[in-house]
Image (spheres, helix red, strand yellow):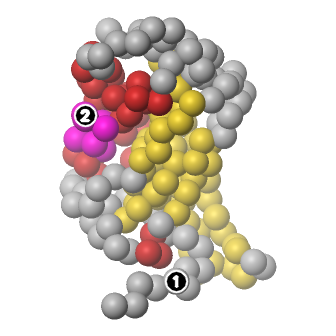
């Protein structure tokens, strides 16, 4: 059973960059779920009980994120911030094995790997959620980041799981693709 202390959903609209107006705002949304870490403070070899927690978070947050985005998702990403009584692998167990399926299902596909990040931190630590194009892992213009934090999370015995979506890439991209 998932023990959720709090959920936050946020929306960011980027309308200009470097003093230049964008042709249209780039919308990024994120859902943050703060859950109790059942393995905080102890080593456990089998982390599989954390796998379905990721799926449950995805199933709970994705419909709200899709509605908040207001259009088709082009980029996606996921991340976890583990409280200091846990280990980074606890976050990986929440975001890797089962979270991708509800994310892809909600956006109607997604051929590319979902970029991810996991780290340890204290309450208020910022977490960079990497974003990448949902179908083209080599679309450099869509390599992006959405930075999130919660002032009171994660507590030492918690994990903050984050899902992010965007309807475009970086503002004013000029990197193109790598030379052959």
The image quadrant of residue 135 is: bottom left
Residue density around tag 2, few if under 14, some if 14–19, many if 20 or more, within 10 Å: some
User: Which type of secondary structure does the marked residue at label 1 adopt?
Assistant: loop
> Circle 1 sits on which residue?
175
The front one of 102 and 88 is: 88
Does residue 13 appear left or right of residue 40 in this picture? right
**Residue 85 percent location from the top left of the image:** 56, 15
Tell me where the magenta segment starts and ends, as one range: 96-103
Image quarter in which the N terminus is found: top left
Q: Position of residue 128 (x, y in %)?
A: 58, 48
The answer to whether the residues at label 1 and label 2 have Cβ atoms under 8 Å apart is no
Residue displayed at 61% across by 53% down: 12
Residue that lies at the very extreme toward the bottom in this rendered image: 180
Q: In the displayed structure, would residue 111 be above or below residue 50?
A: below
Mark 1 or mark 2, which has the lower sequence index? 2
Left or right position of 164 against 17: left
Quadrant in which the C terminus appears: bottom left
* Residue shown at 35% from the left, 12% from the top: 44
Label 2 secondary element? loop
Residue 129 covered by magenta stretch:
no
Residue sticking out furthest to the right: 19
Image point (64%, 64%), residue name: 14
Q: Is residue 157 above or below residue 67?
A: above
Res 98 label: 2
Q: Nearer the viewer, residue 177 or 25?
A: 177
Instruction: Compute the Cα span from label 1 to label 2.
Output: 32 Å
Residue 80 in percent (x, y) is at 48, 34
Q: Residue at x 66, y 69 (%)?
A: 15
The dot on residue 111 is none
Residue 57: image location, x then y, percent: 37, 28
Of 10 and 56, nearer the camera is 56
């Amino acid at each position: 059973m998932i023990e959720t202390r709090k959920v936050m959903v946020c929306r960011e609209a980027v309308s200009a960059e470097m003093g230049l107006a964008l042709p249209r705002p780039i919308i990024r949304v994120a859902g943050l779920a703060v859950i109790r870490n059942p393995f905080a403070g102890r080593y456990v070899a089998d982390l599989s009980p954390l796998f379905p927690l990721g799926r449950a978070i995805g199933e709970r947050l994705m419909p709200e994120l899709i509605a908040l985005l207001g259009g088709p998702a082009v980029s996606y990403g996921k991340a976890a911030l583990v409280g200091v009584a846990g280990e980074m692998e606890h976050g990986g167990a929440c975001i890797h094995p089962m979270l991708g399926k509800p994310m892809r299902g909600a956006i109607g596909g997604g051929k590319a790997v979902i970029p991810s990040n996991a780290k340890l931190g204290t309450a208020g630590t910022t977490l960079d959620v990497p974003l990448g194009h949902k179908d083209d892992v080599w679309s450099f213009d869509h390599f992006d980041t959405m930075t999130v934090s919660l002032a009171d999370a994660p507590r030492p015995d918690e994990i903050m799981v984050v899902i992010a979506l965007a309807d475009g890439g970086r503002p004013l991209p000029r990197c193109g693709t790598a030379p052959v």
